[in-house]
Each structure stands twice: as C-alpha cells, then as structure tokens.
C-alpha cells in the first residue's frame, strides 16, 4: 500500500514537472530578433524555416494574402493577413513555435481588367527565442611562475551575460580548473533564471599555482546548462588557457670570447644554475668541444652534479681554444639532463655562441704539368698562394730544386702583399732525367700582416713520374697535371680539408723558353749587322 502511494506521488510530481516545462502560451514566448526566413513571394511561393514550410496560398483584391504553414507536407495552420499583420503557431508535438509576419502586400491591379497581375507579399518568419550565454574569463596574468618567494595565487573572475533572445531557466554553471587546487571560491553555481540581456554578478576564484617539472598549459573551462521556456537544454562554454612555468628549471650558460685574432686564444666557460624550488640530483652536464679550433687544455666532456634549490655551479667546464683558420664559427651548446620524480627525462640546453676569428690565412698549393714524362722532358711547376683570411698579409715563398731535377727557367720564389680573399701564382720549369718517381719538396712561405701577426706555411708535396722509354706502356703524352692536397701538413698550415679555388688576380709567371728565344733573336740581329759592316 505504501509503495503504491509513493509511486502515485512520483507520478504526480513527474506530470507536474513536465507540465511546468511545457505549460506556456504563445503570449509567453519571447521571439527571436533575427529572421529565420524572409522573402518576396508570389502566389504559390514558399519559405523554409527548419522543418516548416510557409506558403503563399492566395491573394484577394481587398489586400489580403493567405498564408499556410506546413510540416511534412501536412497543413498545420492557415490564415489571411494584411500588410503589417501576422500570426503565431505552436506545434505542441514538436515543441516548436513560429511567428509569420506580412510586411508588405502589392496587388498590382490592372486598370483595364481590374484583375491582379503577379501580386507579391514580403513575408518574414521568426522562431522562438533561445537563451545564449556570453562567458568572459579573466585572470590577472596569462603566465604564472611558482618559483618567486612571494606567495602567489591565480585570481580568476568570470562574467556571464544572457545575450540570447529569451530568458534562461534553471541554469547550472560549472567551472573546471584542470586539477588545480582551489584556494577560495566555488566551482558550481545555480541560478533559477537569467533574463534576456541580463548580466550576472561576477564570480571570483582564487587558485593555487600548481608545481610541474616542465612548462605546462592548463585550462580554466566554464560551462553553463540552461533551459528555455519549452524545457530544452542549451549549453554554452568558454575556455581560457594559462601557462605555468616549471617549479625546477636548470639554466645552462656557455660563454666564449666573441672575437679574437689568429694569434690570440678564446676562453670558454660553462656554468649551470638550478632556478627552482626543489633539489635535483644526478644531473648529467655534457659539453662538446668544437672541431673548428684547437683545444689547449685537458678537459672532460661530461660530469654528474647535484643541486639544492637556487644553487649555482659556476665554471664547471673552463678551457681555452686556439684558432687554426679565420672565419665565424659556432660553438656547440652544453646540455644538461636529469630524471624527475615522475620518471620523465628533462633536458636543458645553453645557447650555441659564435666566435669570429680575424687575420690572414695563407694556403699554398703546388701543381705539376705534366706529371708523367720521359727522361729529359721539361715539367712546369705552378705554385698558388691564396689568402683565405680577413686581413692582408705580406707573403714570401721559396722553392727548392731536388736532386734529380735541373732548373730551366722561372721564378723560385714570391714576395708580395696578398690581399684578403685574393690569390697570386707563379711558375718555373725543371728538367728531369732519371727514371722513376721524383718528389718535389714543399714550398715554404712566411707571412706577416700589418698587426705584426706572422707565421709560416707549407704546400703539398708534388710527385712527377719519369717513364722508362723502353717500356711499351710509357705514354707521357696522356698525362696532363698533378694536383695533390693543398695542405701538405695540416698541423703546420692549419688549413686541413680546404679546397683551393682559382681566384687569381695577379699571375706572375717568369719567362722560361720565351726568354731563350728572345736571346737567340737578339744574337741573330747582332750577327747580321756585323756581316753588313764587313761588306
């Protein structure tokens, strides 16, 4: 018996609830201010609004236009209207409401026949207005750092306004703070109604700044669920994203002397700072030394460290570098890695600083043409002197004729100023007699620039092959030139791996056979003149 009474009571409450949600008249409806459909219609023309079709059924000479409302092909309502009149329609089964309004009617009556000619009506259709919430979330900052000593909170304000076309009923507001701890305020609110164009009182929250081991984005999300006059639920949402700095941040710095001369030294140091509020252990700090400069000290590549909060370890690595060539070079970054309490690995890098090396950079290369000859043949030796640096330099070179070769003509040395990024060349001729391979020693050079920086360089060793004429495989005509690596001794020249580029602006080639021919010509002229004197 008791259960039957309880069931009856619940049934009554349920009926009352449903009735309260749908028990309204068209007079209670707040219509949307925006048209759902409109147009200038002739007889038989239609407009579409959702599931409904509004059709012009007929006109009469009294200025009336007959309007019908259809759903699924079935006439739901029909009414004659004049300009400025309208009617409202409620579909109780579907829970929809429409308002049809006739703005103007043009009958276009013919003066001769008195009949209407293509009459038209401007018809507008409006649907029931719905609530819509405009949500604004504000915080005092967009980025928060938990590391400053002063206690901080995320102060959040939430403003909600009903910007829709109808009142909102029984609205629930929920705030999702993405796991952040609430310091002050409430995360849920309920409002019995929010009228159209009405703004609610500002909601204020205070949140504790969370502690993460890496920079993290968190969201504050506000969601409203409200009902319209027909009991339909409408959801609106807004999200604001905040950036939270890590509670522990290892800051690695790597510095290098920004600019030096070729005779100078660059100083490098690596330091690390725990800019955090927690201790960190087993931090591996790795430092890569550049291959573009020569390391002058015995220094390791990595070390393991531990830090208390805010602790700095200065000059963990400190060493000097010596330049081997000019140019601008990037020093590799230092890298710190550690594993956090969450099991994830975290990495911090320093900047990769640059260093500029100034000064002359002299490169010598020696070429032979041909590099395979028969005994008694001549070989042309060509020496190129190039300044790949950033400063001009005075260069003096010298060549040595090896045993087994005879000097024929040309210049065995060079002395001149070689400007930056420019090159000079000279050549001489030798004659070889002995069968086998003959190695020509390196060309040596000394240089000095206007800053007083000086040094020495050597070229590659060139080799000429003297063939055995009795051998049928001898074919010196098929050989053209010899071009070995430019830098015969990288440790001395500092130019290992650099390719020579033909950029010749001054070709100083000393006369060889041309000089001999000139002497013969002068001697012939002299003898001819003597004969004429005797005759």
Image: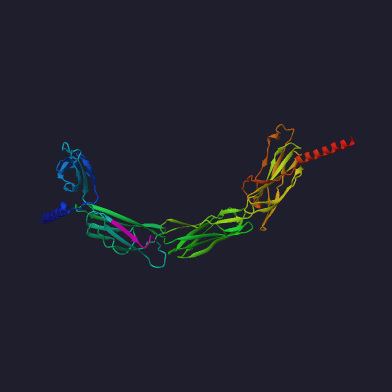
Image quarter of residue 68: top left
In this view, which residue lies farthest toward the front? 112
In this view, which residue lies farthest toward the right? 534
User: In this picture, is 244 found above or below 60?
Assistant: below
In this view, which residue lies farthest toward the left? 1
Using residue 78 as the reference point, say whether residue 250 is left or right of it. right
Image quarter of residue 219: bottom left
What segment carries the magenta color? 134-143
Camera-nearest residue between 253 and 367: 367
Q: Chief secondary structure of the magenta span? A: strand
In this rendering, does residue 384 appear at all? no
For the N terminus, give its image quadrant: bottom left
Estimate the x, y position of residue 336 in percent, counting from the top left.
Answer: 49, 58
In this view, which residue lies farthest toward the bottom? 150
Camera-nearest residue between 120 and 352: 120
Camera-nearest residue between 111 and 37: 111
For the C terminus, give its image quadrant: top right
Asked if residue 23 lies in the magenta stretch, the reply is: no
In the image, what residue occupies the spot 89% across and 36% down?
A: 534
């Amino acid at each position: 018996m008791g259960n039957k009474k309880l069931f009856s009571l619940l049934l009554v409450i349920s009926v009352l609830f449903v009735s309260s949600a749908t028990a309204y008249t068209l007079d209670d409806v707040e219509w949307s201010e925006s048209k759902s459909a409109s147009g200038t219609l002739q007889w038989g023309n239609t407009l579409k609004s959702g599931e409904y079709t509004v059709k012009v059924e007929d006109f009469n000479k009294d200025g009336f236009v007959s309007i019908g409302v259809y759903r699924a092909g079935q006439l739901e309502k029909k009414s004659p209207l004049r300009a400025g009149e309208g009617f409202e329609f409620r579909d109780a089964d579907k829970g929809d409401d429409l308002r049809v309004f006739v703005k103007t009617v043009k009958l276009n009556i013919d003066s001769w026949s008195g009949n209407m000619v293509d009459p038209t009506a401007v018809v507008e259709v409006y649907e029931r207005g719905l609530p819509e919430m405009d949500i604004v979330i504000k915080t005092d900052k967009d980025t928060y750092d938990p590391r400053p000593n002063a206690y901080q909170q995320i102060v959040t304000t939430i403003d909600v306004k009903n910007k829709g076309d109808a009142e909102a009923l029984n609205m629930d507001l929920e705030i999702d703070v993405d796991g952040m701890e609430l310091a002050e305020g409430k995360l849920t609110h309920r409002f019995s109604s929010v009228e159209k164009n009405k703004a609610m009182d500002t909601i204020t929250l205070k949140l504790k700044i969370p502690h993460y081991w890496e920079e993290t984005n968190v969201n504050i999300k506000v969601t409203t669920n409200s009902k319209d006059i027909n009991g339909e639920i409408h959801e609106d949402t807004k999200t604001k994203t905040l950036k939270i700095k890590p509670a522990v941040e290892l800051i690695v710095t790597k510095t290098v002397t920004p600019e030096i001369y070729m005779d100078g030294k660059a100083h490098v140091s690596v330091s690390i700072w725990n800019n955090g509020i927690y201790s960190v252990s087993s931090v591996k700090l790795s430092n890569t030394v550049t291959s573009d400069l020569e390391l002058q000290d015995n220094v390791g590549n990595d070390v393991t460290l531990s830090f208390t909060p805010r602790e700095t370890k200065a000059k963990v690595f400190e060493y000097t570098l010596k330049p081997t060539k000019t140019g601008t070079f990037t020093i590799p970054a230092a890298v710190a890695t550690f594993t956090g309490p969450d099991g994830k690995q975290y990495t911090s890098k320093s900047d990769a600083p640059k260093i500029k090396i100034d000064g002359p950079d002299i490169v010598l290369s020696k070429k032979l043409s041909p590099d395979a000859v028969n005994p008694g043949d001549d070989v042309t030796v060509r020496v190129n002197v190039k300044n790949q640096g950033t400063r001009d330099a005075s260069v003096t070179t010298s060549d040595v004729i090896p045993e087994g070769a005879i000097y024929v003509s040309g210049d065995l040395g060079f002395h001149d100023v070689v400007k930056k990024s420019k090159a000079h060349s000279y050549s001489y001729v030798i004659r070889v007699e002995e069968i086998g391979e003959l190695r020509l020693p390196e060309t040596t050079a000394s240089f000095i620039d206007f800053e007083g920086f000086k040094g020495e360089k050597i070229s590659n060793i060139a080799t000429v092959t003297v063939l055995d004429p009795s051998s049928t495989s001898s074919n010196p005509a098929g050989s053209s030139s010899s071009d070995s690596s430019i830098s015969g001794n990288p440790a001395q020249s500092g130019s290992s791996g650099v390719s020579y580029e033909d950029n010749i602006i001054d070709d100083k080639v000393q006369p060889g056979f041309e000089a001999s021919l000139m002497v013969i010509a002068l001697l012939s002229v002299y003898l001819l003149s003597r004969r004429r004197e005797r005759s």
